[in-house]
Image: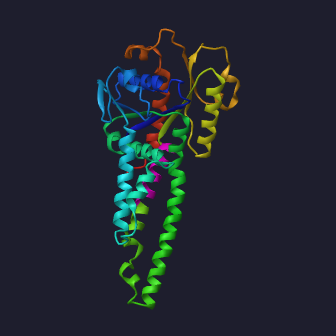
Amino acid sequence: MHSTAFFLGKGGVGKTTLSSAFALTLARHGAKVLVASLDPAHNLGDALGVKLSGNATNVEPNLDALEVDLGYWVDKYLEDSRRQLKANYAYNVTLNLDSFFDILKYSPGTEEYAVLWAIEDIHCRLGPLYDVVVFDTPPTALSLRFLSLPTISGLWVKELGKLREKILTKRQTITRLNPDSPVAASCVDKDDDKVYGQLKGIKARLQALEHLFACESFISVIINPDKLSVDEALRIQEELTKLHVPLSAVCINKQGVSDMDWSQNPSLARYPQFIYDFSRGGISTREDLLGIGADALAERFREASRDTNVKGKKPCN
């Protein structure tokens, strides 16, 4: 079974650096690792010293990396939606779907859904090829939105399923009263209804992603010794709690760059803590990444992964 890790935090706290160091440490200890950047402003290739694309690229033995092409996934999400709507409503020639999708591309939520389906693809298609998949995430706002989407969208899909059942029941009633009604041609049981079947499929995919985030993932929040990043970490912790997604670790990066005592905050201090000193010489090679010292975090991850594997994982649909 493979395991998954997410690194969250405010922009600039060092998510890419620590996720790269973490992935490299696991790979050097024998695990086959894929590290994937979800951040539209990709820096993963720079950190690892290789040119990356949307396909997995080998960095060194046991370590592959990719940078998700968000534009591709937005276009794919829209095209899949367009195809499904055209198939379901082919009878309605007055429905101008093209103009609808021209607007939808710029609508709120489109980018978040694109990221969500990219995570699903990496988890289900590439994940079985690796022992560990590590996600370097975008800044907090986008990350929290895609983490919350399975729960929020699941509620919508559940209600849409109930509405579709009511529509099918009414069609059956009309057909019994008037077999010659135009409705009779579209009267089917819900098990044979395309729309209801698609809703069931989407619901299953969302439930699998919700389970991935809540039960199968090791989630670390990264902070710096400054008030802004600590406040943002507290917001992340609060939102994850609402979603029933457990926080696994707090990583204090750039320790020594200021005198702030982050540990005074009990909400963060109760999680396993891993401290990384500020590197005045910078990070310029993969060996510099190893010098950060991610071994303790990697060992904590391995312990958590063993617990997860014992409990079992939800298969991809």
**Residue at horizontal 40%, vertical 26%?**
44
Answer whether residue 204 is magenta in the image.
yes
Q: Residue furthest top?
A: 281
Q: How is the image coloured?
A: rainbow
Total marks shown come to 0
Q: Pinpoint residue 195: horizontal percent, then vertical percent.
A: 40, 67
Q: Pinpoint residue 5: horizontal percent, then vertical percent.
A: 46, 34
The answer to which image quadrant residue 21 occupies is: top left
**Residue at horizontal 64%, vertical 33%?**
234
The answer to whether one can see residue 317 in this image is no
Is the magenta region chiefly helix, strand or loop?
helix
Answer whether residue 102 is magenta in the image.
no
Q: Pinpoint residue 106: horizontal percent, then vertical percent.
A: 46, 47
- The magenta span reads 201-215
**Residue at horizontal 47%, vertical 17%?**
293
**Residue at horizontal 47%, vertical 21%?**
294
Q: Nearer the viewer, residue 228 or 215?
A: 228
Q: Is residue 300 above or below residue 126?
A: above
Which quadrant of the rendered structure holds the N terminus?
top left
Q: Is residue 217 above or below residue 193?
A: above
The answer to whether one can see residue 35 in this image is yes
Q: Nearer the viewer, residue 165 or 309?
A: 165
Q: Pinpoint residue 218: horizontal percent, then vertical percent.
A: 49, 35
Q: Nearer the viewer, residue 316 or 36?
A: 36
